[in-house]
Image: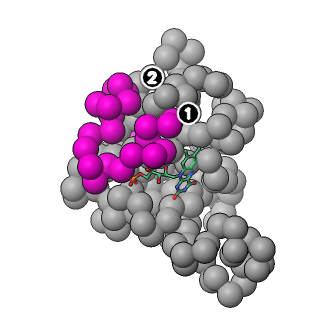
């Protein structure tokens, strides 16, 4: 039984600053910074929902991936790594190496977690949903989607939450 509240205060404090979304696809493993997402419950399952634009390399990995992990730094930590993962693309090289992040096996899914992050969510892909642009308020469309590069919502069933004070 997942205790969804475990680490949630830490998670919600760090999310607006950025957390890592790590995905293992057929092409390899990659991580990118995200600052939008939800922790919640649907179909009686604990889920994390991430928003990934079509243009991201992460999206191309998610086409075939079966899982992903969400890796949360200590509050206010790893800012340079978050900047690298949030501005460079895995298409152009190994971001773990550039950002000096270490991957280590997770406990319940194929995708690894990031050792330097004390809070990690392991998620099994459950569902995905595209946005309906015509239903998005005009002011948000203008601000966030000037090029129609909308987000796809990826729903991951949380299979494990690890909290490690020593990271
Ligand atoms: C603080 C921050 C938050 C971000 N949040 C998201 C997000 O929620 N969804 C998204 O698609 N891109 C987001 N990005 C942009 C991606 O992290 C960025 O485009 C990244 O280079 C994509 O990497 P990839 O091509 O290796 O997938 C964010 C960037 C930063 C710096």
Span of residues in magenta: 82-108
The mark found on residue 116 in the picture is: 2
Identify the residue at image location x=59%, y=58%. Answer: 49
User: For this view, does 115 lie left or right of residue 36?
Assistant: left
Check whether the beta carbons of the residues at disc 2 and disc 1 lie within 8 A of each other. Answer: no
**Near-viewer residue (88 or 110):** 88
- How would you rate the neighbour count of disc 2 (Cα within 10 Å): few for under 14, some for 14-19, many for 20 or more? many
Does residue 138 sit above or below 107 in this rendering? below
Quote the CA–CA distance across marks 2 and 1: 9 Å
Image x and y of residue 118, in percent: 53, 24
Identify the residue at image location x=42%, y=50%. Answer: 68
Residue 149 magenta-highlighted: no
User: For this view, does 52 lie left or right of residue 75?
Assistant: left
Determine whether the residue tagged by mark 2 lies in a helix, strand or loop.
loop
Determine whether the residue tagged by mark 1 lies in a helix, strand or loop.
strand
Does residue 51 sit above or below 136 in this rendering? above
């Amino acid at each position: 039984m997942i205790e969804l509240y475990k680490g949630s205060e830490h998670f919600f404090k760090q999310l607006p600053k950025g957390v890592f979304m790590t995905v293992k696809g057929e092409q390899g493993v990659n991580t990118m910074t995200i600052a939008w997402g939800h922790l919640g419950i649907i179909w009686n399952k604990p889920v994390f929902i991430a928003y990934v634009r079509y243009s991201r390399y992460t999206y191309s990995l998610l086409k075939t991936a079966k899982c992903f992990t969400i890796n949360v730094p200590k509050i206010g930590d790893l800012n340079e790594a978050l900047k690298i993962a949030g501005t460079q693309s895995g298409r152009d090289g190994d971001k773990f190496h550039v950002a000096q992040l270490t991957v280590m096996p997770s406990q319940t899914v194929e995708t690894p977690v990031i050792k330097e992050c004390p809070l990690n969510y392991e998620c099994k892909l459950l569902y995905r949903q595209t946005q309906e642009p015509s239903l998005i308020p005009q002011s948000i469309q203008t601000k966030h989607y000037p090029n129609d590069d909308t987000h796809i919502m990826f729903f991951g069933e949380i299979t494990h939450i690890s909290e490690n004070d020593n990271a």
